[in-house]
Image: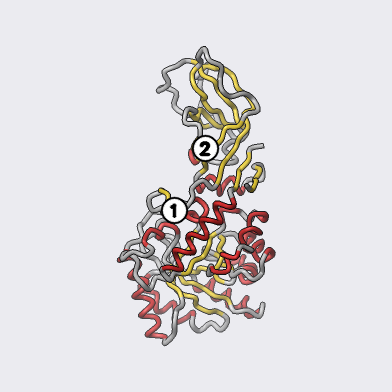
């Protein structure tokens, strides 16, 4: 079975480096672990690591993930990082200490459920700043907060925004400054303190410690940079973080010298995805079939470590890679060998979620 190798020590080093950066600039942060799909073995390592005690909270977009976190270490402050669905309210209050919200009806339901469970639930109210995903409209901010402040079992943790996740709107000084101004307005109008301005996700990370980050923005939600060592701002390695954190290993189950183009009438009924063979300068090549397919991962999110191999095609549960043209030399691979890939963030997320892929800590 194909296997995803999780280099846990390197990931924990990334978490430590990020925490040092945030402490230096007086920024709190939420470690977003949705990429792990509730993987208990690694979560145990992570949640009992001393560095996690210095982190504001641990976040996930799945309730099952938050439940697993609370089962492993009930002391961890948890955050549900998307607006809750109405039929999940009971579980949100049970397993999430904080949730991100943009609907008053939802917050009202959270308030009622928190009262039933004898709890106070904390919310970060999201504001729309152009990404057109979650967030209340800016002209409705004061009215919205007026209503939320009247709910007895709700504590407002702060205001937040999401940028860069859907349309790729960049977090800029002007965008984030709006959050700072809203905080000042709300604190003055309601004579209260809002602890956090949550300024986004890993895409905001390169602004930390620079003039492009308004001083009042004091919280950030980080997943990709901690686990992959990169920033989605430019898809490059961030500072001294480690990018060698995951490795995907597949098994060669067939290896034959075959034609590079199919033979027969090509129909529209195929279910596979193939690469263009017109650019190939050879008629035959060594072709390896490996044990994963479309159900497991998007092959375009995998980079072969052997730069000489090329993607040829994939179906639901098998993929084919071109290992190079036929020569007088013997192919360097054989059935039973591994083809090894560097997966992207989205590839890791899908592979962690697949019950057909083995996961191993190293």
- Please report contact status of discs 2 and 1: CB closer than 8 Å, yes or no: no
Which of the 4 image quarters holds residue 118? bottom right
Q: Looking at the picture, how far across and down is residue 245, in whole percent?
A: 54, 48
Q: Looking at the picture, how far across and down is residue 26, in whole percent?
A: 43, 71
* Residue 74 shown left or right of residue 257 in the figure: right
Quadrant the N terminus occupies: top right
Q: Nearer the viewer, mark 2 or mark 1?
A: 1
Q: Mark 1 points at which residue?
A: 240
Local SS, label 2 = helix
Residue 120 makes an appearance in the image? yes
Q: Looking at the picture, how far across and down is residue 285, in whole percent?
A: 51, 19
Local SS, label 1 = loop
* Residue 36 shown left or right of residue 172 in the figure: right
Pointer 2 or 1: first along the chain: 1
Label number found at residue 299: 2
Which of the 4 image quarters holds residue 165? bottom left
Q: How many labels does the image show?
A: 2
Mark 2 and mark 1: Cα distance apart in space: 28 Å
Please, is residue 61 above or below residue 177 in the view?
above
Q: Nearer the viewer, residue 126 or 348?
A: 348
Label number found at residue 120: none
| Disc 1 crowd, CA 10 A, few/some/many (<14, 14-19, 20+) | few
* Residue drawn 45% across the image and 16% down it: 282
């Amino acid at each position: 079975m194909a296997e995803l190798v999780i280099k846990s020590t390197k990931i924990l080093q990334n978490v430590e480096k990020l925490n040092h950066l945030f402490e230096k600039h007086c920024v709190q942060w939420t470690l977003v672990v949705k990429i792990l799909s509730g993987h208990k073995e690694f979560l145990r390592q992570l949640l009992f690591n001393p560095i996690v005690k210095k982190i504001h909270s641990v976040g996930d977009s799945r309730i099952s993930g938050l439940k697993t976190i609370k089962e492993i270490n009930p002391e961890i402050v948890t955050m549900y990082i998307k607006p809750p669905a109405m039929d999940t309210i009971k579980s949100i209050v049970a397993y999430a200490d904080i949730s991100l919200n943009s609907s008053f009806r939802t917050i009202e339901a959270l308030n009622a459920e928190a009262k039933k469970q004898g709890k106070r639930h904390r919310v970060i109210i999201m504001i729309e700043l152009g990404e057109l995903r979650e967030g209340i409209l800016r002209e409705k901010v004061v009215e919205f907060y007026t209503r939320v402040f009247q709910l007895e079992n709700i504590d407002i943790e702060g205001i937040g925004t999401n940028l860069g996740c859907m349309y790729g709107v960049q977090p800029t000084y002007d965008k984030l400054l709006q959050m700072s101004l809203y905080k000042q307005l709300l604190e003055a109008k309601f004579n209260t303190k809002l602890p956090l301005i949550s300024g986004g996700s890993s895409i905001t990370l390169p602004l930390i410690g620079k003039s492009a980050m308004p001083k009042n923005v004091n919280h950030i939600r980080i997943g990709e940079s901690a686990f992959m060592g990169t920033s989605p701002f430019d898809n490059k390695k961030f500072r001294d973080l480690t990018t060698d954190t995951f490795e995907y290993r597949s098994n060669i189950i067939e290896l034959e010298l075959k034609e590079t183009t199919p033979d027969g009438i090509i129909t529209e009924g195929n279910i596979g995805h193939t690469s263009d063979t017109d650019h190939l300068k050879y008629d035959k090549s060594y072709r390896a079939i490996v044990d994963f397919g479309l159900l497991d991962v998007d092959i375009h999110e995998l980079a072969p470590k052997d730069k000489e191999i090329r993607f040829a095609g994939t179906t639901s549960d098998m993929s084919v890679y071109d290992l190079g043209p036929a020569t007088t030399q013997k192919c360097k691979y054989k059935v039973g060998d591994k083809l090894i890939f560097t997966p992207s963030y989205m590839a890791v997320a899908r592979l962690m979620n697949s019950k057909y892929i083995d996961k191993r800590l190293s």
